[in-house]
Image: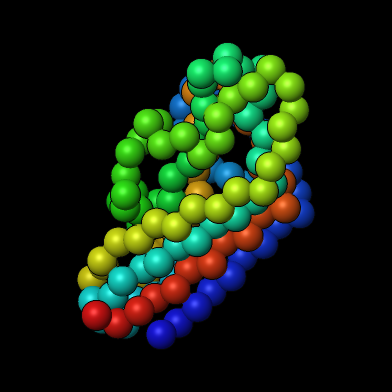
Amino acid sequence: MQTKVVRSNTSVSDSSSSWVDATGMSINVNAPSESLMLVTFSAESDCFNAADADWCSLRAMIGTKVGEPNEGTDFAWQGGTSVNPYMSLAMTRSRIVGAGTYTVKIRMNSNSNDFRLDDMAMVVQVIDV
């Protein structure tokens, strides 16, 4: 088993309705054979200036594929609010991959709200299957 960690104290913000990279949350990992890539991400989060029934979304990219479960923008990382509800949140995603080198990164989608991540950490484990 191989474990890699990336951390950042630099905040990243977005208010578009498209998927953008969470700056600083990218790392290259090598799978020596068929492997399970397990991605755990945690961060301080704020999804604000949003209707109370809205949310902000995240996903983990493993190479060119989205980590599972993959619910697109239907995955509510944090529910929206009209105030600043800073929270500490976490998610885990995974995918079976073949041998090779993969870029693992976190992408964010504000769904047209104001979305801010800070104090982020990503742990990627490569487990032989």
Query: Number of callouts in the render?
Result: 0
Q: How is the image coloured?
A: rainbow
Using the image as rendered, state which of residue 76 and residue 2 is in the foreground: 76
In the image, 3: left or right of 66? right
Is residue 64 visible from the viewing direction of this image? no
Q: Please tell me in which quadrant of the rendered image residue 49 appears.
A: top right
**Looking at the picture, how far across and down is residue 110, in whole percent?**
54, 28
Identify the residue shown where x is 67% and y is 34%: 46
Judged left or right of residue 11, residue 40 is left
Q: Residue at x 40, y 51 (%)?
A: 61
Say if 95 sits above or below 50 in the image: below
In the figure, residue 123 lies in which quadrant? bottom right
Question: Which of the pair 38/88 is nearer the observer?
Answer: 88
Query: Residue 124: x percent and y percent?
Result: 48, 68
Quarter of the picture containing the C terminus is bottom left
Image location of residue 126, percent across then percent down: 39, 76
- Image point (39%, 56%), residue name: 93
- Quadrant in which residue 38 is drawn: bottom left
Residue 30 horizontal/vertical position (percent): 39, 75
Q: Point out the residue furthest to the top here.
A: 51
Q: Quadrant of the N terminus?
A: bottom left
- Residue farthest front in this picture: 52
Note whether 127 is above or below 88 in the view shown. below
Q: Is residue 9 above or below residue 14?
A: below
Residue 119 visible in the picture: yes
